[in-house]
Image: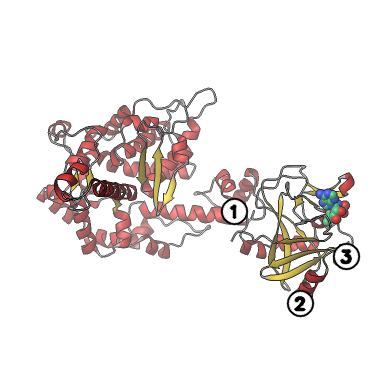
Amino acid sequence: MAPKREKDRRIITCLQCFKPQEVLPNHLLRVCMKGQTDEERKAEVDRAKTSMKAWTLRGRTWDYNAMVKRYPDEASRQALLEELRERHFLILNDPKDAQAESSHRPPDAAKHAQSTLEDCQRVLRASQEDMFGIHRKLMDQQHVEEEQRTMFRYFCEAILVLIYFQRPEAVRAFTASDWINKTNVDGRIHMELQSTKQSATLSLTEEDSAMLETYFTKIRPECLQESVDDQGRFFLSKQGLPVVNVTSDLRRLHEQYDLPSFSSQQARRAQSTMPCSSSDEPANERRVRKQKRGRGAADQADRDFGAFLLQFPATASSSPPTKKKRTAAGFPPDRVFYDRWRAVQLAKREEHLLSQCSRRPPTISKVSLLIKKEVWTGNCPRPKDVVAKWKPFTRMQVESDPWIITTIQNQKWTGLALKDFGTKGQGVVATKAFAMGSIVCDYHGKVITGAEGRKLVQTIKGDMGYLFFFHAAGRDLCVDAETFPCECHPTENSMGRKINHSSKRANLSPVHCMMNFPEGQRDVILFQAKRDIRLCEELLFDYGVKRKSFRGEAMTLDWLDD
Ligand SMILES: C[S@@+](CC[C@H](N)C(=O)[O-])C[C@H]1O[C@@H](n2cnc3c(N)ncnc32)[C@H](O)[C@@H]1O
Protein backbone atom coordinates (compact mmCIF):
# COMPACT_ATOMS: atom_id res chain seq x y z
CA MET A 1 0.00 0.00 0.00
CA ALA A 2 1.19 3.51 -0.70
CA PRO A 3 2.51 5.39 2.37
CA LYS A 4 -0.03 7.74 3.91
CA ARG A 5 0.59 11.33 2.98
CA GLU A 6 -1.38 14.41 3.61
CA LYS A 7 -3.45 15.10 0.51
CA ASP A 8 -2.02 18.26 -0.98
CA ARG A 9 1.28 18.54 0.77
CA ARG A 10 4.08 19.56 -1.52
CA ILE A 11 7.42 17.87 -1.17
CA ILE A 12 10.28 20.34 -1.29
CA THR A 13 13.91 19.42 -1.59
CA CYS A 14 16.11 20.82 1.16
CA LEU A 15 18.92 22.74 -0.49
CA GLN A 16 21.23 22.01 2.48
CA CYS A 17 21.11 18.21 2.45
CA PHE A 18 19.48 17.80 -0.99
CA LYS A 19 16.88 15.41 0.40
CA PRO A 20 13.18 15.83 -0.33
CA GLN A 21 11.21 16.94 2.74
CA GLU A 22 7.52 16.83 3.43
CA VAL A 23 7.68 19.67 5.96
CA LEU A 24 10.76 21.68 5.16
CA PRO A 25 10.49 24.29 7.99
CA ASN A 26 10.42 21.47 10.59
CA HIS A 27 13.27 19.70 8.91
CA LEU A 28 15.41 22.85 8.88
CA LEU A 29 14.57 23.55 12.51
CA ARG A 30 15.48 20.04 13.62
CA VAL A 31 18.24 19.05 11.28
CA CYS A 32 19.90 21.23 8.71
CA MET A 33 19.61 24.72 10.25
CA LYS A 34 19.31 23.87 13.92
CA GLY A 35 21.41 26.68 15.28
CA GLN A 36 20.11 29.41 12.98
CA THR A 37 17.49 32.11 13.40
CA ASP A 38 13.84 31.92 12.32
CA GLU A 39 14.50 34.57 9.66
CA GLU A 40 17.36 32.60 8.19
CA ARG A 41 15.25 29.44 8.10
CA LYS A 42 12.35 31.31 6.52
CA ALA A 43 14.67 32.70 3.87
CA GLU A 44 15.94 29.18 3.23
CA VAL A 45 12.39 27.85 2.82
CA ASP A 46 11.68 30.60 0.27
CA ARG A 47 14.89 29.77 -1.56
CA ALA A 48 13.97 26.09 -1.72
CA LYS A 49 10.44 26.90 -2.91
CA THR A 50 11.79 29.11 -5.68
CA SER A 51 14.20 26.40 -6.72
CA MET A 52 11.41 23.80 -6.69
CA LYS A 53 9.20 26.05 -8.76
CA ALA A 54 11.95 26.59 -11.32
CA TRP A 55 12.46 22.84 -11.53
CA THR A 56 8.77 22.18 -11.96
CA LEU A 57 8.51 24.82 -14.65
CA ARG A 58 11.46 23.46 -16.56
CA GLY A 59 9.72 20.12 -16.43
CA ARG A 60 10.75 16.68 -15.49
CA THR A 61 9.90 15.11 -18.79
CA TRP A 62 12.59 14.19 -21.29
CA ASP A 63 11.87 13.27 -24.81
CA TYR A 64 13.98 10.41 -26.09
CA ASN A 65 13.77 11.73 -29.65
CA ALA A 66 15.27 15.04 -28.50
CA MET A 67 18.00 13.12 -26.65
CA VAL A 68 18.89 11.26 -29.82
CA LYS A 69 19.40 14.58 -31.48
CA ARG A 70 21.50 16.03 -28.71
CA TYR A 71 23.47 12.92 -27.77
CA PRO A 72 24.19 10.98 -30.91
CA ASP A 73 26.60 8.68 -29.07
CA GLU A 74 24.54 5.60 -28.18
CA ALA A 75 26.56 4.59 -25.11
CA SER A 76 26.44 8.01 -23.41
CA ARG A 77 22.82 8.37 -24.28
CA GLN A 78 21.92 5.03 -22.75
CA ALA A 79 23.86 5.95 -19.60
CA LEU A 80 21.97 9.21 -19.34
CA LEU A 81 18.71 7.41 -19.95
CA GLU A 82 19.37 4.96 -17.14
CA GLU A 83 20.29 7.80 -14.81
CA LEU A 84 17.13 9.73 -15.66
CA ARG A 85 14.97 6.66 -15.17
CA GLU A 86 16.54 6.10 -11.78
CA ARG A 87 15.78 9.66 -10.81
CA HIS A 88 12.16 9.09 -11.84
CA PHE A 89 12.18 11.46 -14.76
CA LEU A 90 9.50 10.76 -17.31
CA ILE A 91 10.89 9.63 -20.63
CA LEU A 92 8.73 10.20 -23.64
CA ASN A 93 9.17 7.92 -26.62
CA ASP A 94 11.35 5.69 -24.48
CA PRO A 95 12.63 2.87 -26.73
CA LYS A 96 12.17 0.53 -23.79
CA ASP A 97 8.43 1.03 -24.01
CA ALA A 98 8.07 0.10 -27.61
CA GLN A 99 8.94 -3.52 -26.85
CA ALA A 100 6.92 -3.68 -23.69
CA GLU A 101 3.64 -2.94 -25.48
CA SER A 102 2.75 -6.44 -26.49
CA SER A 103 3.44 -7.93 -23.11
CA HIS A 104 1.18 -5.81 -20.97
CA ARG A 105 -0.17 -7.33 -17.80
CA PRO A 106 -3.70 -8.68 -17.66
CA PRO A 107 -6.21 -6.44 -15.84
CA ASP A 108 -6.20 -8.41 -12.63
CA ALA A 109 -2.48 -8.37 -12.26
CA ALA A 110 -2.53 -4.62 -12.67
CA LYS A 111 -5.06 -4.30 -9.90
CA HIS A 112 -3.02 -6.25 -7.41
CA ALA A 113 0.46 -5.11 -8.19
CA GLN A 114 1.48 -1.55 -7.52
CA SER A 115 1.32 0.18 -10.87
CA THR A 116 4.39 1.79 -12.24
CA LEU A 117 4.32 4.98 -14.17
CA GLU A 118 5.12 2.95 -17.25
CA ASP A 119 1.97 0.89 -16.69
CA CYS A 120 -0.10 4.01 -16.28
CA GLN A 121 1.29 5.65 -19.37
CA ARG A 122 1.18 2.53 -21.54
CA VAL A 123 -2.05 3.59 -23.21
CA LEU A 124 -0.34 6.71 -24.50
CA ARG A 125 2.41 4.69 -26.08
CA ALA A 126 0.02 2.11 -27.47
CA SER A 127 -2.15 4.74 -29.10
CA GLN A 128 0.65 7.09 -30.14
CA GLU A 129 1.05 5.76 -33.66
CA ASP A 130 -2.69 6.00 -34.34
CA MET A 131 -2.86 9.46 -32.85
CA PHE A 132 0.01 10.66 -35.03
CA GLY A 133 -1.94 9.29 -37.98
CA ILE A 134 -5.03 11.27 -36.99
CA HIS A 135 -2.88 14.33 -36.35
CA ARG A 136 -1.38 14.00 -39.81
CA LYS A 137 -4.77 13.61 -41.46
CA LEU A 138 -6.09 16.65 -39.65
CA MET A 139 -3.07 18.67 -40.73
CA ASP A 140 -3.66 17.56 -44.32
CA GLN A 141 -7.31 18.52 -44.04
CA GLN A 142 -8.25 14.95 -44.81
CA HIS A 143 -11.46 13.46 -43.57
CA VAL A 144 -11.24 12.05 -40.05
CA GLU A 145 -14.01 9.83 -38.74
CA GLU A 146 -16.05 11.10 -35.82
CA GLU A 147 -14.88 8.18 -33.69
CA GLN A 148 -11.24 8.96 -34.39
CA ARG A 149 -11.77 12.62 -33.48
CA THR A 150 -13.23 11.53 -30.17
CA MET A 151 -10.32 9.16 -29.55
CA PHE A 152 -7.94 12.00 -30.29
CA ARG A 153 -9.69 14.09 -27.66
CA TYR A 154 -9.43 11.24 -25.16
CA PHE A 155 -5.73 11.02 -25.97
CA CYS A 156 -5.24 14.74 -25.29
CA GLU A 157 -7.11 14.42 -22.00
CA ALA A 158 -4.92 11.42 -21.17
CA ILE A 159 -1.76 13.47 -21.83
CA LEU A 160 -2.80 15.94 -19.16
CA VAL A 161 -3.81 13.23 -16.70
CA LEU A 162 -1.08 10.65 -17.19
CA ILE A 163 1.95 12.77 -18.07
CA TYR A 164 1.17 16.00 -16.29
CA PHE A 165 -0.76 14.37 -13.43
CA GLN A 166 -3.76 16.62 -13.59
CA ARG A 167 -6.89 15.56 -11.76
CA PRO A 168 -9.94 14.83 -13.96
CA GLU A 169 -11.66 17.83 -12.41
CA ALA A 170 -8.84 20.12 -13.54
CA VAL A 171 -8.92 18.71 -17.07
CA ARG A 172 -12.69 19.18 -17.17
CA ALA A 173 -12.34 22.80 -16.01
CA PHE A 174 -9.48 23.57 -18.43
CA THR A 175 -10.56 26.49 -20.65
CA ALA A 176 -9.76 27.71 -24.13
CA SER A 177 -8.52 30.88 -22.51
CA ASP A 178 -5.98 28.90 -20.44
CA TRP A 179 -4.70 27.50 -23.71
CA ILE A 180 -4.64 30.78 -25.63
CA ASN A 181 -2.59 32.45 -22.91
CA LYS A 182 0.13 29.80 -22.92
CA THR A 183 3.69 30.95 -23.42
CA ASN A 184 6.74 29.35 -24.93
CA VAL A 185 9.73 29.51 -22.63
CA ASP A 186 12.90 27.91 -23.95
CA GLY A 187 11.01 25.34 -25.94
CA ARG A 188 8.60 24.40 -23.13
CA ILE A 189 4.98 25.46 -23.34
CA HIS A 190 3.92 26.99 -20.05
CA MET A 191 0.28 27.08 -19.26
CA GLU A 192 -1.66 28.14 -16.20
CA LEU A 193 -4.81 26.23 -15.42
CA GLN A 194 -6.56 29.24 -13.97
CA SER A 195 -9.94 27.68 -13.76
CA THR A 196 -9.12 25.04 -11.17
CA LYS A 197 -9.59 25.77 -7.48
CA GLN A 198 -5.85 25.79 -6.99
CA SER A 199 -4.30 27.23 -10.13
CA ALA A 200 -1.64 24.96 -11.56
CA THR A 201 1.23 25.67 -13.93
CA LEU A 202 2.01 23.04 -16.52
CA SER A 203 5.16 22.93 -18.57
CA LEU A 204 4.40 20.90 -21.67
CA THR A 205 6.84 19.55 -24.21
CA GLU A 206 6.44 20.87 -27.72
CA GLU A 207 5.23 17.44 -28.88
CA ASP A 208 2.46 17.24 -26.29
CA SER A 209 1.56 20.83 -26.92
CA ALA A 210 1.34 20.13 -30.67
CA MET A 211 -1.25 17.41 -30.04
CA LEU A 212 -3.35 19.73 -27.88
CA GLU A 213 -3.00 22.49 -30.45
CA THR A 214 -4.23 20.14 -33.16
CA TYR A 215 -7.26 19.30 -31.05
CA PHE A 216 -7.81 22.99 -30.38
CA THR A 217 -7.51 24.16 -33.97
CA LYS A 218 -8.84 21.22 -35.93
CA ILE A 219 -11.36 19.36 -33.81
CA ARG A 220 -12.75 21.75 -31.22
CA PRO A 221 -13.93 24.41 -33.72
CA GLU A 222 -16.02 21.75 -35.47
CA CYS A 223 -17.77 21.01 -32.17
CA LEU A 224 -18.77 24.60 -31.44
CA GLN A 225 -22.41 25.30 -31.98
CA GLU A 226 -24.15 28.64 -31.74
CA SER A 227 -27.05 27.31 -29.67
CA VAL A 228 -24.88 25.42 -27.18
CA ASP A 229 -23.10 27.00 -24.21
CA ASP A 230 -19.55 25.61 -24.26
CA GLN A 231 -18.63 27.64 -21.13
CA GLY A 232 -15.35 28.47 -22.79
CA ARG A 233 -14.04 24.99 -21.94
CA PHE A 234 -11.19 23.46 -23.88
CA PHE A 235 -12.48 19.91 -24.20
CA LEU A 236 -15.90 19.67 -25.80
CA SER A 237 -18.10 16.79 -26.78
CA LYS A 238 -19.07 16.49 -30.43
CA GLN A 239 -22.33 18.26 -29.52
CA GLY A 240 -20.31 21.23 -28.28
CA LEU A 241 -20.92 20.63 -24.57
CA PRO A 242 -18.10 20.69 -22.02
CA VAL A 243 -16.83 17.17 -21.31
CA VAL A 244 -18.29 15.88 -18.07
CA ASN A 245 -16.41 12.76 -17.18
CA VAL A 246 -12.70 12.70 -17.93
CA THR A 247 -12.28 9.44 -16.02
CA SER A 248 -14.74 7.70 -18.34
CA ASP A 249 -12.96 9.15 -21.35
CA LEU A 250 -9.71 7.71 -20.07
CA ARG A 251 -11.35 4.34 -19.50
CA ARG A 252 -12.71 4.32 -23.05
CA LEU A 253 -9.26 5.06 -24.44
CA HIS A 254 -7.88 2.10 -22.48
CA GLU A 255 -10.71 -0.13 -23.72
CA GLN A 256 -9.99 0.86 -27.27
CA TYR A 257 -6.46 -0.47 -26.90
CA ASP A 258 -7.54 -3.44 -24.85
CA LEU A 259 -5.50 -2.28 -21.90
CA PRO A 260 -6.31 -2.32 -18.21
CA SER A 261 -7.60 1.04 -17.15
CA PHE A 262 -5.54 3.33 -14.92
CA SER A 263 -7.03 6.26 -13.11
CA SER A 264 -5.47 9.66 -12.58
CA GLN A 265 -5.07 8.77 -8.92
CA GLN A 266 -3.05 5.70 -9.79
CA ALA A 267 -0.87 7.75 -12.09
CA ARG A 268 -0.21 10.33 -9.38
CA ARG A 269 0.51 7.64 -6.84
CA ALA A 270 2.85 5.87 -9.25
CA GLN A 271 4.63 9.12 -9.89
CA SER A 272 5.13 9.94 -6.23
CA THR A 273 5.75 6.53 -4.75
CA MET A 274 6.96 4.05 -7.32
CA PRO A 275 10.55 3.87 -8.39
CA CYS A 276 10.86 3.55 -12.11
CA SER A 277 14.28 2.02 -12.16
CA SER A 278 15.64 0.14 -15.08
CA SER A 279 16.28 -2.75 -12.70
CA ASP A 280 12.50 -3.31 -12.56
CA GLU A 281 12.64 -4.55 -16.06
CA PRO A 282 12.85 -8.33 -16.06
CA ALA A 283 16.15 -9.58 -17.37
CA ASN A 284 14.55 -11.65 -20.12
CA GLU A 285 12.58 -8.63 -21.36
CA ARG A 286 15.76 -6.61 -21.43
CA ARG A 287 17.48 -9.33 -23.40
CA VAL A 288 14.62 -9.56 -25.87
CA ARG A 289 14.77 -5.82 -26.27
CA LYS A 290 18.46 -5.89 -26.99
CA GLN A 291 17.95 -8.60 -29.56
CA LYS A 292 15.10 -6.73 -31.19
CA ARG A 293 17.02 -3.53 -31.32
CA GLY A 294 19.32 -4.53 -34.12
CA ARG A 295 22.22 -2.59 -35.48
CA GLY A 296 20.05 -0.96 -38.11
CA ALA A 297 17.72 0.47 -35.49
CA ALA A 298 20.61 1.79 -33.42
CA ASP A 299 22.07 3.49 -36.46
CA GLN A 300 18.73 4.98 -37.32
CA ALA A 301 18.26 6.28 -33.84
CA ASP A 302 21.62 8.03 -34.06
CA ARG A 303 20.63 10.03 -37.04
CA ASP A 304 19.07 13.32 -36.31
CA PHE A 305 16.41 15.23 -38.04
CA GLY A 306 18.99 17.64 -39.46
CA ALA A 307 20.54 14.77 -41.38
CA PHE A 308 17.09 13.76 -42.55
CA LEU A 309 16.50 17.24 -43.92
CA LEU A 310 19.86 17.22 -45.62
CA GLN A 311 18.95 13.97 -47.29
CA PHE A 312 15.42 15.05 -48.12
CA PRO A 313 15.32 18.85 -48.40
CA ALA A 314 11.87 20.16 -47.49
CA THR A 315 10.99 22.90 -49.92
CA ALA A 316 7.60 24.23 -50.94
CA SER A 317 7.64 22.08 -54.06
CA SER A 318 9.49 18.93 -52.98
CA SER A 319 7.75 15.58 -52.65
CA PRO A 320 7.73 13.89 -49.27
CA PRO A 321 10.18 11.01 -48.89
CA THR A 322 8.38 7.70 -49.16
CA LYS A 323 8.82 5.02 -46.53
CA LYS A 324 10.93 3.09 -49.02
CA LYS A 325 13.24 6.06 -49.55
CA ARG A 326 13.43 6.82 -45.83
CA THR A 327 14.36 3.32 -44.89
CA ALA A 328 16.71 2.95 -47.85
CA ALA A 329 18.56 6.01 -46.56
CA GLY A 330 18.83 4.36 -43.14
CA PHE A 331 16.19 6.38 -41.31
CA PRO A 332 13.56 4.85 -39.02
CA PRO A 333 10.56 3.44 -40.85
CA ASP A 334 8.17 5.16 -38.43
CA ARG A 335 6.64 8.52 -39.32
CA VAL A 336 8.32 10.69 -36.69
CA PHE A 337 10.81 12.37 -39.04
CA TYR A 338 8.33 12.21 -41.87
CA ASP A 339 5.79 14.17 -39.84
CA ARG A 340 8.36 16.76 -38.88
CA TRP A 341 9.44 16.99 -42.50
CA ARG A 342 5.88 17.73 -43.51
CA ALA A 343 5.58 20.38 -40.81
CA VAL A 344 8.73 22.07 -42.17
CA GLN A 345 7.32 21.93 -45.67
CA LEU A 346 3.98 23.30 -44.55
CA ALA A 347 5.75 26.28 -42.97
CA LYS A 348 7.74 26.84 -46.19
CA ARG A 349 4.57 26.70 -48.25
CA GLU A 350 2.92 29.23 -45.98
CA GLU A 351 6.01 31.41 -46.32
CA HIS A 352 5.88 31.03 -50.10
CA LEU A 353 2.23 32.10 -50.20
CA LEU A 354 2.85 35.00 -47.85
CA SER A 355 5.73 36.23 -49.98
CA GLN A 356 3.17 36.81 -52.73
CA CYS A 357 1.05 38.99 -50.48
CA SER A 358 3.79 40.87 -48.76
CA ARG A 359 2.53 44.43 -48.93
CA ARG A 360 -0.93 43.98 -47.52
CA PRO A 361 -2.68 41.10 -45.74
CA PRO A 362 -4.36 38.74 -48.17
CA THR A 363 -7.98 37.66 -48.05
CA ILE A 364 -8.92 34.00 -47.68
CA SER A 365 -10.13 33.87 -51.26
CA LYS A 366 -6.87 35.34 -52.52
CA VAL A 367 -4.86 32.67 -50.68
CA SER A 368 -7.20 29.96 -51.96
CA LEU A 369 -6.56 31.17 -55.49
CA LEU A 370 -2.80 31.19 -54.94
CA ILE A 371 -2.97 27.63 -53.58
CA LYS A 372 -5.00 26.53 -56.61
CA LYS A 373 -2.26 27.79 -58.88
CA GLU A 374 0.25 25.50 -57.19
CA VAL A 375 0.41 21.82 -58.04
CA TRP A 376 0.40 20.62 -54.46
CA THR A 377 -1.41 17.37 -53.95
CA GLY A 378 -1.31 17.23 -50.17
CA ASN A 379 0.14 19.07 -47.19
CA CYS A 380 -1.58 22.26 -48.31
CA PRO A 381 -1.69 25.18 -45.88
CA ARG A 382 -5.15 26.29 -44.87
CA PRO A 383 -5.98 29.73 -46.32
CA LYS A 384 -7.16 31.04 -42.97
CA ASP A 385 -3.88 29.96 -41.31
CA VAL A 386 -1.94 31.83 -43.98
CA VAL A 387 -4.06 34.94 -43.52
CA ALA A 388 -3.54 34.74 -39.75
CA LYS A 389 0.22 34.51 -40.20
CA TRP A 390 0.55 37.61 -42.32
CA LYS A 391 2.87 40.11 -40.70
CA PRO A 392 3.86 43.63 -41.64
CA PHE A 393 6.95 43.93 -43.73
CA THR A 394 10.43 43.82 -42.40
CA ARG A 395 12.70 46.57 -43.61
CA MET A 396 14.58 44.20 -45.91
CA GLN A 397 11.38 42.97 -47.54
CA VAL A 398 10.14 46.49 -48.12
CA GLU A 399 13.37 47.74 -49.60
CA SER A 400 13.41 45.06 -52.28
CA ASP A 401 9.73 44.56 -52.87
CA PRO A 402 9.12 44.75 -56.63
CA TRP A 403 5.54 45.97 -56.25
CA ILE A 404 6.52 48.87 -54.01
CA ILE A 405 9.43 49.78 -56.26
CA THR A 406 7.22 49.81 -59.35
CA THR A 407 4.47 51.73 -57.61
CA ILE A 408 6.87 54.41 -56.39
CA GLN A 409 7.97 54.75 -59.99
CA ASN A 410 4.51 54.89 -61.54
CA GLN A 411 2.71 56.49 -58.56
CA LYS A 412 -0.27 54.22 -59.02
CA TRP A 413 -1.00 53.44 -55.39
CA THR A 414 -4.29 51.66 -54.95
CA GLY A 415 -7.01 52.12 -52.35
CA LEU A 416 -6.59 55.89 -52.08
CA ALA A 417 -8.81 58.78 -53.16
CA LEU A 418 -8.75 62.54 -52.79
CA LYS A 419 -11.53 64.25 -50.87
CA ASP A 420 -12.26 67.88 -50.22
CA PHE A 421 -12.15 68.72 -46.54
CA GLY A 422 -13.14 72.37 -46.75
CA THR A 423 -10.91 74.60 -44.70
CA LYS A 424 -7.95 72.29 -44.68
CA GLY A 425 -8.21 71.74 -48.42
CA GLN A 426 -7.99 68.36 -50.00
CA GLY A 427 -7.05 65.24 -48.15
CA VAL A 428 -6.70 61.52 -48.84
CA VAL A 429 -9.17 58.83 -47.82
CA ALA A 430 -8.84 55.06 -47.87
CA THR A 431 -11.10 53.33 -50.37
CA LYS A 432 -10.18 49.95 -48.92
CA ALA A 433 -9.22 48.74 -45.50
CA PHE A 434 -5.49 48.75 -44.69
CA ALA A 435 -4.20 46.44 -42.00
CA MET A 436 -1.74 47.73 -39.44
CA GLY A 437 1.76 47.62 -40.88
CA SER A 438 0.67 47.90 -44.50
CA ILE A 439 2.62 50.20 -46.77
CA VAL A 440 0.04 52.71 -47.99
CA CYS A 441 2.03 54.99 -50.31
CA ASP A 442 5.19 57.10 -50.40
CA TYR A 443 5.85 60.77 -49.75
CA HIS A 444 6.95 61.57 -53.22
CA GLY A 445 9.48 64.24 -54.06
CA LYS A 446 13.11 64.93 -54.62
CA VAL A 447 15.15 63.88 -51.63
CA ILE A 448 17.98 66.26 -50.76
CA THR A 449 20.66 64.79 -48.54
CA GLY A 450 24.21 65.47 -47.36
CA ALA A 451 25.54 69.01 -46.89
CA GLU A 452 22.79 70.53 -48.97
CA GLY A 453 20.13 68.76 -46.92
CA ARG A 454 21.80 69.78 -43.67
CA LYS A 455 21.97 73.39 -44.83
CA LEU A 456 18.30 73.33 -45.71
CA VAL A 457 17.43 71.92 -42.32
CA GLN A 458 19.38 74.72 -40.64
CA THR A 459 18.22 77.59 -42.80
CA ILE A 460 14.81 76.79 -44.12
CA LYS A 461 12.87 77.05 -40.88
CA GLY A 462 9.98 79.33 -41.61
CA ASP A 463 9.94 78.65 -45.33
CA MET A 464 6.97 76.68 -46.57
CA GLY A 465 7.49 74.21 -49.28
CA TYR A 466 9.98 71.77 -47.86
CA LEU A 467 8.84 68.88 -45.82
CA PHE A 468 12.07 68.17 -44.11
CA PHE A 469 13.00 65.11 -42.20
CA PHE A 470 16.00 65.04 -40.02
CA HIS A 471 18.26 62.33 -38.70
CA ALA A 472 16.81 59.59 -40.83
CA ALA A 473 19.38 56.82 -40.82
CA GLY A 474 21.74 59.16 -38.99
CA ARG A 475 21.63 61.69 -41.82
CA ASP A 476 19.78 64.89 -42.53
CA LEU A 477 17.53 64.71 -45.50
CA CYS A 478 14.79 66.84 -46.95
CA VAL A 479 12.01 66.09 -49.39
CA ASP A 480 11.12 68.78 -51.84
CA ALA A 481 7.42 69.32 -51.33
CA GLU A 482 7.30 72.57 -53.21
CA THR A 483 7.58 71.42 -56.79
CA PHE A 484 4.11 70.13 -57.42
CA PRO A 485 3.30 68.19 -59.44
CA CYS A 486 6.74 66.65 -59.25
CA GLU A 487 9.09 66.65 -62.22
CA CYS A 488 8.89 62.91 -62.70
CA HIS A 489 5.09 62.68 -62.67
CA PRO A 490 3.70 65.90 -64.11
CA THR A 491 0.30 64.35 -64.72
CA GLU A 492 -0.10 62.20 -61.64
CA ASN A 493 -1.61 63.09 -58.30
CA SER A 494 1.01 62.25 -55.80
CA MET A 495 -1.26 61.01 -53.04
CA GLY A 496 1.30 61.06 -50.26
CA ARG A 497 1.75 64.79 -50.57
CA LYS A 498 -1.98 65.37 -50.19
CA ILE A 499 -2.20 63.74 -46.80
CA ASN A 500 -3.27 66.11 -44.05
CA HIS A 501 -1.86 66.54 -40.59
CA SER A 502 -3.05 65.30 -37.23
CA SER A 503 -0.97 64.75 -34.17
CA LYS A 504 -3.71 62.98 -32.22
CA ARG A 505 -5.49 61.00 -34.91
CA ALA A 506 -2.53 60.10 -37.11
CA ASN A 507 -3.01 56.67 -38.64
CA LEU A 508 0.16 56.67 -40.73
CA SER A 509 3.82 56.76 -39.78
CA PRO A 510 6.42 58.04 -42.23
CA VAL A 511 9.33 55.60 -42.44
CA HIS A 512 12.64 56.03 -44.17
CA CYS A 513 13.87 53.28 -46.51
CA MET A 514 16.77 52.78 -48.88
CA MET A 515 14.85 51.28 -51.75
CA ASN A 516 16.68 48.96 -54.12
CA PHE A 517 15.73 50.43 -57.48
CA PRO A 518 17.14 48.77 -60.61
CA GLU A 519 19.42 51.80 -61.10
CA GLY A 520 20.64 51.68 -57.50
CA GLN A 521 19.61 52.51 -53.95
CA ARG A 522 17.61 55.64 -53.23
CA ASP A 523 16.15 57.28 -50.12
CA VAL A 524 12.40 56.99 -49.98
CA ILE A 525 9.86 58.04 -47.39
CA LEU A 526 7.02 55.54 -47.14
CA PHE A 527 3.81 55.75 -45.16
CA GLN A 528 3.00 52.73 -43.06
CA ALA A 529 -0.36 52.10 -41.36
CA LYS A 530 0.04 52.62 -37.61
CA ARG A 531 -3.11 50.63 -36.95
CA ASP A 532 -5.90 49.04 -38.94
CA ILE A 533 -7.43 51.69 -41.17
CA ARG A 534 -11.10 51.43 -42.07
CA LEU A 535 -12.69 51.98 -45.43
CA CYS A 536 -13.42 55.68 -46.02
CA GLU A 537 -11.21 56.84 -43.16
CA GLU A 538 -9.09 59.93 -43.79
CA LEU A 539 -5.38 59.24 -43.90
CA LEU A 540 -3.43 61.45 -41.53
CA PHE A 541 0.11 61.72 -40.30
CA ASP A 542 1.78 63.87 -37.75
CA TYR A 543 3.67 66.66 -39.54
CA GLY A 544 5.63 67.24 -36.35
CA VAL A 545 4.54 70.87 -36.18
CA LYS A 546 5.12 72.04 -32.64
CA ARG A 547 4.29 75.76 -32.75
CA LYS A 548 1.81 77.76 -34.79
CA SER A 549 4.54 80.28 -35.66
CA PHE A 550 6.61 77.52 -37.21
CA ARG A 551 5.46 77.24 -40.78
CA GLY A 552 7.65 74.39 -41.95
CA GLU A 553 7.05 70.74 -41.14
CA ALA A 554 9.68 68.64 -39.49
CA MET A 555 9.92 65.26 -37.92
CA THR A 556 12.18 62.45 -36.90
CA LEU A 557 11.45 59.32 -38.85
CA ASP A 558 10.37 56.07 -37.38
CA TRP A 559 12.05 52.87 -38.37
CA LEU A 560 10.32 49.85 -39.69
CA ASP A 561 10.56 46.90 -37.38
CA ASP A 562 13.31 44.65 -38.56
C1 LIG B 1 0.83 68.45 -47.55
S1 LIG B 1 -0.46 69.57 -47.75
C2 LIG B 1 -1.87 68.58 -47.56
C3 LIG B 1 -2.84 68.75 -48.69
C4 LIG B 1 -3.61 70.01 -48.66
N1 LIG B 1 -4.72 69.94 -47.76
C5 LIG B 1 -4.10 70.36 -50.08
O1 LIG B 1 -5.30 70.58 -50.28
O2 LIG B 1 -3.26 70.38 -50.96
C6 LIG B 1 -0.26 70.44 -46.28
C7 LIG B 1 -1.19 71.61 -46.12
O3 LIG B 1 -2.52 71.18 -45.89
C8 LIG B 1 -3.13 71.96 -44.92
N2 LIG B 1 -3.41 71.12 -43.75
C9 LIG B 1 -2.94 69.91 -43.52
N3 LIG B 1 -3.43 69.42 -42.38
C10 LIG B 1 -4.24 70.34 -41.89
C11 LIG B 1 -5.03 70.42 -40.73
N4 LIG B 1 -5.08 69.42 -39.85
N5 LIG B 1 -5.75 71.51 -40.53
C12 LIG B 1 -5.71 72.53 -41.41
N6 LIG B 1 -4.98 72.53 -42.52
C13 LIG B 1 -4.25 71.46 -42.76
C14 LIG B 1 -2.13 73.02 -44.56
O4 LIG B 1 -2.41 74.15 -45.36
C15 LIG B 1 -0.84 72.41 -44.94
O5 LIG B 1 0.14 73.38 -45.24
Badge nearest the viewer, 1 or 2: 2
Disc 3 residue type (three-letter)? Thr
Disc 2 residue type (three-letter)? Ala
Say whether residue 166 is left or right of residue 288.
Answer: right
Badge nearest the viewer, 1 or 3: 3
**Residue 476, placed above or below residue 560:** below
Residue 483, labelled with which disc? 3
Of mark 2 and mark 3, the one earlier in the sequence is: 2
Q: Is mark 2 within 8 Å of ligand 1?
A: no
Categorize mark 1 by other alpha carbons within 10 Å: few (<14), some (14-19), many (20+): many
Disc 1 residue type (three-letter)? Leu
Q: CA distance from mark 1 to mark 2?
A: 44 Å
Residue 451, labelled with which disc? 2
Q: Is residue 469 visible?
A: yes
Q: Quadrant of residue 397?
A: bottom right
Categorize mark 3 by other alpha carbons within 10 Å: few (<14), some (14-19), many (20+): few
| SS label for mark 3 | loop
Say whether residue 467 is left or right of residue 267.
Answer: right
Residue at image mark 1: 353
C-beta proximity under 8 Å, tags 1 and 2: no
Observer-nearest residue: 424 or 323? 424
Of mark 1 and mark 2, the one earlier in the sequence is: 1
Q: Position of residue 105 (x, y in %)?
A: 16, 37
At horizontal 13% and vertical 53% (from top left) the residue drawn is 287
Residue 96, labelled with which disc? none
| SS label for mark 2 | helix
From this viewpoint, which residue is outermost toward the left? 283
